Image (cartoon, rainbow, N blue to C red):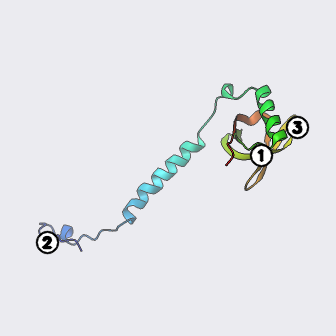
Amino acid sequence: MVYREYLPYKSAREYQDRKMAKWMGFFLSEHTSSLQAEEQETVDPSKYLPLEQVLVLLKQSYLYQFQVEIRANQSGIVKYCIGTVDYLDEQKIGFKTSKSYDFILLEHIIDIYLQEEG
């Protein structure tokens, strides 16, 4: 217990600290605002890799089974995926991650990065 007998007001002397409960409102508001900022991340379509370059990188990843990170704009949300290209055609790719399997349209791909092994 904290010694507060020297304080002039009874309410201050009898104050009981609520510990972490007083921080919960702060945490929730910060968490909510960061989620909203993340959802609002938009990418200018002019910043996308050219389709020819996307196709070259995807073909290399598919042929040699390189692990890549793909950043794609799906339904207005920027999505990051790390995995391998398992299927490739003129319009979409089949992308296999450690947890899921997704199809990504080529026109939605923003960037592709080669992941280092190990």
Q: Nearer the viewer, mark 1 or mark 3?
A: 1
Neighbours of disc 3 within 10 Å: few (<14), some (14-19), many (20+): few
Residue drawn at (82%, 40%) of the image: 64
Q: Position of residue 38 (x, y in %)?
A: 57, 44
Asked if disc 2 and disc 1 are in contact, CB closer than 8 Å, the reply is no
Q: Judge left or right: residue 47 versus residue 7.
A: right
Q: Earlier in the sequence, mark 1 or mark 3?
A: 1
Residue drawn at (87%, 34%) of the image: 90
Residue drawn at (66%, 42%) of the image: 77
Query: In the drawing, what numbered circle is on residue 33?
Result: none
Q: Earlier in the sequence, mark 2 or mark 1?
A: 2
Q: Position of residue 29 (x, y in %)?
A: 46, 52
Looking at the image, is 106 positioned above or below residue 4? above
Query: In the drawing, what numbered circle is on residue 89?
Result: 3
The amino acid pointed to by label 2 is Glu
Q: Position of residue 11 (x, y in %)?
A: 20, 69
Q: Residue furthest bottom?
A: 1
The amino acid pointed to by label 1 is Thr
- Residue 114 figure quarter: top right
Q: Secondary structure at mark 1?
A: strand
Q: Position of residue 70 (x, y in %)?
A: 71, 40
- Residue 107 figure quarter: top right
Neighbours of disc 1 within 10 Å: few (<14), some (14-19), many (20+): many
Q: Which residue is mark 1?
A: 84
Q: Which residue is mark 2?
A: 5
Looking at the image, is 73 positioned above or below residue 14? above
